Amino acid sequence: MSNNLNTNRTFNFSIKVYYEDTDAEGVVYYANYLKFIERARTEMINACDTNLKILHKDYDSRFIVKICNLDFIKSAHLEDVLEVKTSLKKLSNASFVLNQNIFHDEHLILKAEVVIICINRDHKPSKIPDFLKKKIQQLIS
């Protein structure tokens, strides 16, 4: 069973653009936006009073990206402070869909829709731990 959610809340994560994130012109290299949204997802899990190591060890749960659609709207630059806003679009037993939008000075610069699948140590789909589903819903839906 899956739930389509009308999202009102977001998990916000700030990140500063460093030299290592940019090309010779000081523009963020496109692949680094994937790192920025990954960091935001990791911090979102941490905000749910757990972490990826605990989920792996104690719950046999690992989270992988199945689909990631990116819409690059405008470039970020060296020393920009970016805000990644993560919201829950859909939640099911073994997966969830997130909207992850990146803003600079309150202007949308990247839209991402990411499908995350929970798998076990055998790389087979696995149920998201109930406590985590509840925490995610409380945090961003």
Image (cartoon, rainbow, N blue to C red):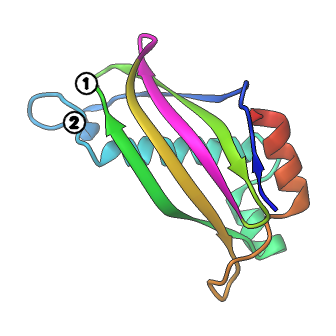
Regarding mark 1 in the picture, which secondary structure is present there?
loop
Q: Name the disc covering residue 45, or none.
A: none
Q: Quadrant of the C terminus?
A: top right
User: Residue type at mark 1?
Assistant: Leu
Q: Looking at the picture, does residue 41 appear above or below residue 115?
A: above
Residue lying furthest top: 105
Q: Quadrant of the N terminus?
A: bottom right
Q: Which residue is mark 1?
A: 78
Crowdedness near tag 2: few (<14), some (14–19) or many (≥20) residues, C-alpha within 10 Å = some
Q: Which residue is mark 2?
A: 22
User: Residue type at mark 2?
Assistant: Thr
Q: Mark 1 near mark 2, Cβ–Cβ under 8 Å?
A: yes
Residue at 66% from the left image edge and 42% from the top image edge = 89
**Nearer the observer, 53 or 104:** 104
Regarding mark 2 in the picture, which secondary structure is present there?
loop
Residue 98 shown left or right of residue 55 in the figure: left
Region in magenta: 95-107
Q: Looking at the picture, does residue 124 appear above or below residue 128?
A: below
- Image spot of residue 103 (x, y percent): 44, 21
The stretch drawn in magenta includes residue 30: no
Q: Main secondary structure of the magenta part?
A: strand
- Image spot of residue 105 (x, y percent): 41, 10
Residue 35 shown left or right of residue 123 in the figure: left
